[in-house]
């Protein structure tokens, strides 16, 4: 039985999604089942690997984005009775790219070696965090970009809201549509509940931003600059309403407080602290 469920989020870019699907199937097909969430894609632009098509009028108009899309995929697995059969969930945007080698085998080996890690991400060669991963290939962080999260099932179970098992709840807060600050919120919940969030340089990943830059109209979203502006403006409004924070800095400090406390309770992991 395969122990990992990979969920890929697509919106009107079937070729991009199919390349990612086929890459994972080629290099990690023995380790994972692969599911594709179509986030309001047009009928003629569905991937041939589509698993679920979210096609309500709202989703067709706006899409799902990462948080709502992963909520949708995870709760579909829950409703179908498949959630409990997996040890971990690999949550991918379709613009994620990997090297021509196994991604999940080394990631699962790291999870096995780090029993309190609930969130694990490959590093990107464009991230400054790579500079902190020289003496230790895997370290624990209080912020990680969310294009390729591997989440341990027990971690999800410790924080999820099964009473709101839909795209608006469950794991991510769907009211934060574009997701500014959602990484901080998830990682704060991890450390507050005795789990860590890690980045590893044993596996590398990249986000191909050319799809957003060159195909914004096709995926029915704003252009890069407008999208970035809305991402920040709407996210700050969400952050202030939910937490009373007026800045990204305040949210970072909130998460770091839980991060520091984790190592007080778990001094055995201090070698992985940044």
Image (cartoon, helix red, strand yellow):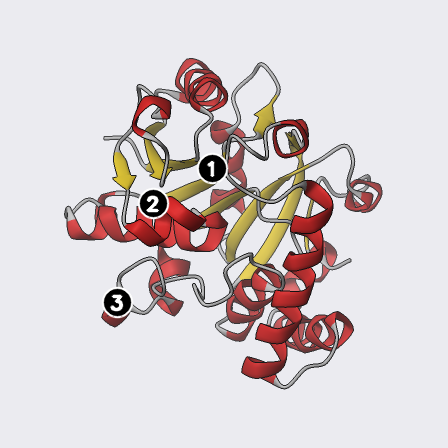
User: Residue shown at 72%/80% (left/top)?
Assistant: 246
Q: Nearer the viewer, residue 35 or 246?
A: 246
Q: Residue at 43% across / 46% down in the picture?
A: 63
Q: Which residue is mark 1?
A: 108
Q: Is 21 on the left or on the right of 132, as rendered?
A: left
Q: Is residue 194 visible?
A: yes
Residue 270 point in image, percent of width and height = 71, 62
Q: Nearer the viewer, mark 3 or mark 1?
A: 3
User: Within 10 Å of the Cα at label 3, are there few (<14), some (14-19), or many (20+) other Cα atoms?
Assistant: few
The N terminus - image quarter? top left
Label 3 with label 1: CB-CB less than 8 Å: no
**Can residue 142 be seen by looking at this rendering?**
no
Q: Is residue 145 left or right of residue 94?
A: right
* Callout 2 crowding tier (Cα within 10 Å): few <14, some 14–19, many ≥20: some
235 or 127: nearer the eye? Answer: 235
Q: Say whether marks 3 and 2 touch (CB < 8 Å).
A: no
Q: Number of marks in the image?
A: 3
Q: Nearer the viewer, mark 3 or mark 2?
A: 3
Q: Which mark is residue 87?
A: 2
Cα distance between the residues tagged 3 and 2: 18 Å
Residue 82 against residue 252 in the figure, above or below = above
Which labelled disc corresponds to residue 162?
A: 3
Mark drawn on residue 238: none
Q: Are marks 1 and 2 in contact (CB under 8 Å)?
A: yes
Mark 3 or 2, nearer chain start: 2
Say which quarter of the image contains residue 136: top right
């Amino acid at each position: 039985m395969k122990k990992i469920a990979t969920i890929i989020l697509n919106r009107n870019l079937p070729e991009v999604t199919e390349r990612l699907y086929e890459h994972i199937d080629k290099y990690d097909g023995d380790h994972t089942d692969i599911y594709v969430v179509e986030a309001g894609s047009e009928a003629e632009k569905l991937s041939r690997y589509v698993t679920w098509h979210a096609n309500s009028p709202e989703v067709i108009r706006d899409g799902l984005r990462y948080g709502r899309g992963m909520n949708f995929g995870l709760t579909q697995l829950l409703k179908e009775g498949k959630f409990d059969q997996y040890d971990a969930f690999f949550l991918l945007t379709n613009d994620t790219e990997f090297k021509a080698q196994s991604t999940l085998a080394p990631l699962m080996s790291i999870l096995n070696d780090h029993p309190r890690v609930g969130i694990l991400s490959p590093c990107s060669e464009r991230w400054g965090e790579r500079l902190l991963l020289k003496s230790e290939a895997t370290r624990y962080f209080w912020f990680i970009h969310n294009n390729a999260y591997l989440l341990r099932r027990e971690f999800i179970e410790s924080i999820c809201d099964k009473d709101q098992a839909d795209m608006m709840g469950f794991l991510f807060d769907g009211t934060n549509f574009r997701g500014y600050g959602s990484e901080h919120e998830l990682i704060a919940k991890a450390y507050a509940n005795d789990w860590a969030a890690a980045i590893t340089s044993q596996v590398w990943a990249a986000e191909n931003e050319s799809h957003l830059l060159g195909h914004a109209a096709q995926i029915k979203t704003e252009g890069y600059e407008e999208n970035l502006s809305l991402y920040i403006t709407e996210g700050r409004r969400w952050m202030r309403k939910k937490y009373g924070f007026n800045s990204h800095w305040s949210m970072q400090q909130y998460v770091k407080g839980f991060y520091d406390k984790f190592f007080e309770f778990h001094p055995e992991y201090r070698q992985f602290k940044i």
